């Protein structure tokens, strides 16, 4: 990975990730009278080999995770049934009196989540209609109104 070393002479050097560990960081939320919260983080150890480095310099890296076509879905739409993740999709059936809408259970593969969205790689396609909230409990096969 590319590492930018800051200082009197800014350098860009090659680095190698040696270790990634889970870490927790506490921060103060809401100003001076706010509450503190623990945030899940990763500690990344990078090894640099360059004769121009003395030690103690500050460095900056950008670490990105590339994923195959992921679709971002509101986290509240993801449901969990004993470890199996799924969403309720909407299936349209044409009838003599017009379209009817039914609930369909769609298993999905979630690769990452934050507090508001989840990245889904399997089970959905773009522009697919899913249920994010409902005034009534839902089951697969239920007829619904949009």
Image (cartoon, rainbow, N blue to C red):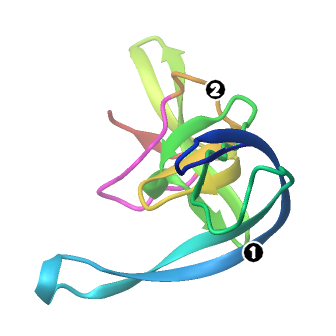
The residue pinned by badge 2 equals: 125
Q: Residue at x 70, y 47 (%)?
A: 108
Please report the bounds of the magenta region as a residue range. Answer: 129-139
Left or right: 32, with 23 as reference point = left
Left or right: 39, with 47 as reference point = left
* Residue 132 covered by magenta stretch: yes
Rendering coords of residue 67 (x, y %): 73, 37
Instruction: Place residue 131 in its image quadrant.
Output: top left
In this view, the residue in front, 51 or 12, is 51
Q: Residue at x 46, y 11 (%)?
A: 96
Depicted 36 relative to depicted 81: above or below: below
Q: What secondary structure is found at the residue carrying circle 2? A: loop
Depicted 81 relative to depicted 49: above or below: below
Left or right: 98, with 118 as reference point = left
Rendering coords of residue 144 (x, y %): 40, 40
Rendering coords of residue 15 (x, y %): 81, 49
Is residue 87 visible to us here? yes
Quarter occupied by the N terminus: top right
The answer to whether the residues at label 1 and label 2 have Cβ atoms under 8 Å apart is no
Say which label, 1 or 2, has the lower sequence index: 1
User: Of circles 1 and 2, which is in front?
Assistant: 1
Is residue 1 visible to us here? no
Quarter occupied by the C terminus: top left
Rendering coords of residue 22 (x, y %): 69, 76
Instruction: Place residue 79 in its image quadrant.
Output: bottom right
Depicted 93 relative to depicted 61: above or below: above
The secondary structure that dominates the magenta segment is loop
Q: Residue at x 57, y 60 (%)?
A: 58
The residue pinned by badge 1 equals: 21
Q: What secondary structure is found at the residue carrying circle 1? A: strand
In this view, the residue in front, 46 or 137, is 46
* Residue 4 covered by magenta stretch: no
């Amino acid at each position: 990975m590319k590492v930018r070393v800051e200082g009197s002479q800014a350098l860009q050097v090659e680095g190698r990730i040696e270790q990634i560990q889970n870490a927790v960081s506490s921060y103060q939320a809401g100003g001076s009278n706010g509450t503190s919260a623990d945030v899940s983080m990763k500690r990344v150890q990078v090894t640099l080999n360059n004769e121009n480095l003395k030690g103690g310099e500050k460095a900056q890296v950008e670490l990105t995770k590339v994923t195959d076509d992921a679709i971002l879905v509101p986290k509240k739409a993801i449901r969990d049934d004993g470890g199996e993740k799924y969403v309720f999709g909407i299936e349209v059936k044409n009838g003599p009196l017009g379209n009817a809408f039914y609930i369909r259970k769609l298993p999905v593969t979630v690769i990452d989540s934050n507090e508001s969205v989840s990245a889904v790689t399997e089970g959905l396609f773009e522009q697919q209609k899913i249920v994010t909230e409902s005034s009534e409990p839902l089951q697969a096969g239920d007829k619904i109104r949009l």
